Amino acid sequence: MEKRVFIYLSLGALLLACPPKVIDKAPDKILHKNGWSLKIWVTAKGTRSEGQIGHLYHYGKEVCPTNGNYYLTTPLGKLLYKENRFPWGWHGWKPIKTDTSALNHINIAGKWQTNFGVMHLHLKDNFYVTGSYTHDSGKLRGKLIGNRLHCTWSEAPSYRPPKDAGDCLFIFSPNGRSFSGKWRYGFSTGKWDGKWSGHKE
C-alpha cells in the first residue's frame, strides 16, 4: 500500500503444526462430523478460568489459524481460536455460540482519523465490518472478534493484489476509541509491510 490499503477475509486455516500446547491427559469429549474432529479438554476445572479448549482436525490433519484469522465455521459449529499469553500454555479452538455478538463488547462503527486518511466503519450484527477511507479511495472488510478486527483492504486503481489489496489487522483499545494495527500487500502468511493506527472522532 505505500500508504495504500478492500478487504476480503478468508476464514480458511492452513493444515500446519499449531503453536505449543500443554496436553497431559485424554480429551473430555470428541466430536466428529464430515471428516472434521474436535478433541475437547476442560481446562482449569473448578476455577474461575475453567473452559473448553479443543484441537481441531480435518481428515486427520490438525487445523491451525492463519493470516491472523482466529474464527472458523465448520460442520461442528463455529469455533474461536484462543491463545494463552505464555507459549507453553493452553492454545486451541473453543466452541462458541451461534450469536457472535456475545464476543464483542465495543462499538467501532463511526468516523475515524487514521494515518491513511478519514475512515468510516460500519458494524453489522456486532460482528461484520465494512468500511471506506480516503487514501486511494480505499475499501475495507472484516470480522470483529473481541477487540481484534481481522480484515482485508483494497484500493484504486485495480482493487486487487499484489499492490492494491491485502490483509490488515486492527487491535482496538478497551473503550473502542483508538486502534493500532498493521497491513501487508496480498493475502499471505508473510511479513507485515506497515503500521495502521487511528482514533475515533
Image (tube, rainbow, N blue to C red):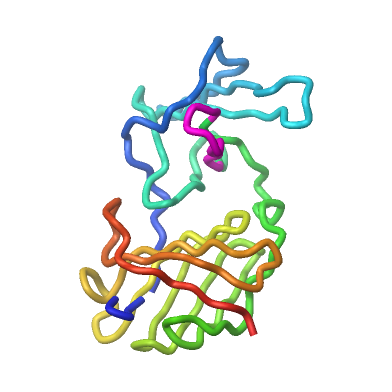
Is 119 above or below relative to 84? below
Is 2 above or below relative to 26? below
Residue 156: percent from the left, percent from the top? 29, 85
163 or 196: nearer the viewer: 196
Residue 126: percent from the left, percent from the top? 66, 64
Left or right: where 1 falls relative to 147:
left
Name which quarter of the figure residue 193 lies in: bottom left
Q: Which residues are magenta?
A: 80-90
Residue plotted at (68% across, 61% down): 174
Is 129 above or below relative to 145? below
Magenta highlight: main SS: loop
Q: Is residue 86 magenta?
A: yes
State the residue lying farthest toward the left. Answer: 162
Residue 60: percent from the left, percent from the top? 36, 22
Residue 189: percent from the left, percent from the top? 30, 51
Residue plotted at (56% across, 10% down): 25
Q: Is residue 48 magenta?
A: no
Residue plotted at (24% across, 81% down): 158
State the residue lying farthest toward the front. Answer: 86
Residue plotted at (36% across, 76% down): 5
